[in-house]
Every structure is written in C-alpha cells, then in structure tokens.
Amino acid sequence: MKEHYDAIMALLDPLPWDVHLAQAPDGTPPAFIVLWGASSPTGGESDRLDGARSDVSARVGVTCTAGTPVGVMAMQAQVRESLCPTGKPARLQVPGYSAWLSPFDSRDVQIDRDAVLTGAATYPAFGVDLYWLNSTPA
C-alpha cells in the first residue's frame, strides 16, 4: 500500500500545505492535510504466500484542517482538483500497477473542539473527503 499512498502524496505535494500519512506530528502549522486509509489485506494490498502481488481495493481518506471552515472548504477544492481534476476517476502513477482513484463521499466540515491551534485561542476546523483506490498489478 505504501507505493499507492506515495503516488497520492505526490499529487498533493505541489499544494501549499504539509501532507502527512496517518497523522500530523505535534507542532504542525494550523493548515495541513492528512492522508489515511487501509493498510491490511482486508482493505488493501495482500501478499500471497507465493509472493505474487494482488489487487488493491481500498478506501482512502483525505482530512483537511485549517483555522476556519471556509479555509477547509478552500483547501478541499484544491485537493479535489489535484487528485481527480474532472471529478471522475483519475489514474495514479504507481510502479507495477494500473491504479485509479475515485471520489465517493465528502463529510460535513466541522469544528474540532478537542484541539486548540498552536499560538491561538481558537479551535481548528476539518473536513474529510473519501476516495476509492482500485489497483491491479500491471
């Protein structure tokens, strides 16, 4: 799965925010992106006993965090444009695979009242977009 996440992160790299896999470290600037999802055979790549690679079909989440809900929505628009420019399935460049990423859900933007932005007295906002990753060995 790592090479699939690397391909997705490469698409997000030109954006002006830090992109993290699974979680953001302490001290991260207030606006950032977290990419997360399956890492097990039930939701991702499974290695067979004979060493052959198998198909990948996994849910991938992209969480955008910013100081305000409007900031999150602006981030999400740029992330969506980077990952699936037409709003339809987009091909990923994953060595040894034919891989596609498809948008399928977006959760409501919310305020995280359990966290406080570093150096501020406000709560951050976050939004989650969900994608399906489908990939087969080339």
Image: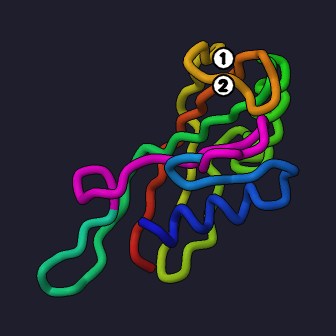
- Return the x and y of residue 89 as percentages of the image width and height: 61, 48
Q: Secondary structure at mark 1?
A: loop
Q: Which mark is residue 40?
A: none
Q: Is residue 28 magenta?
A: yes
Label 1: how many residues lie within 10 Å, few (<14), some (14-19) or many (20+)? some
Look at the image and tell me whether residue 28 can be seen.
Answer: yes
- Return the x and y of residue 87 as percentages of the image width and height: 71, 38
- Return the x and y of residue 4 as percentages of the image width and height: 51, 65
Residue lying furthest bottom: 50
Residue located at (53% from left, 47% from top) = 23
Q: What residue is shown with label 1? A: 109
In the displayed structure, does residue 97 sit left or right of residue 113? left
Residue located at (64% from left, 25% from top) = 127
Q: Give the residue type at disc 2.
A: Phe
Work out whether 81 lies above or below 20. Answer: above
Q: N-terminal of the two: label 2 or label 1?
A: 1
Q: Residue 51: which quarter of the image?
A: bottom left
- Return the x and y of residue 24 as percentages of the image width and height: 60, 47
Q: Nearer the viewer, residue 92 or 125?
A: 125
Q: Residue 75: which quarter of the image?
A: top right
State how far apart marks 2 and 1 are (Cα): 6 Å
Query: Which range is magenta?
Result: 25-44
> Which quadrant is home to the C terminus?
bottom left
Would you say the residues marked 2 and 1 are in contact, meaning their CB atoms lie under 8 Å apart? yes
Label 2: how many residues lie within 10 Å, few (<14), some (14-19) or many (20+)? many
Q: What residue is shown with label 2? A: 126
- Secondary structure mostly seen in the magenta stretch: loop
Look at the image and tell me whether residue 86 can be seen.
Answer: no
In the displayed structure, does residue 16 sit left or right of residue 66? right
Q: Give the residue type at disc 1.
A: Val
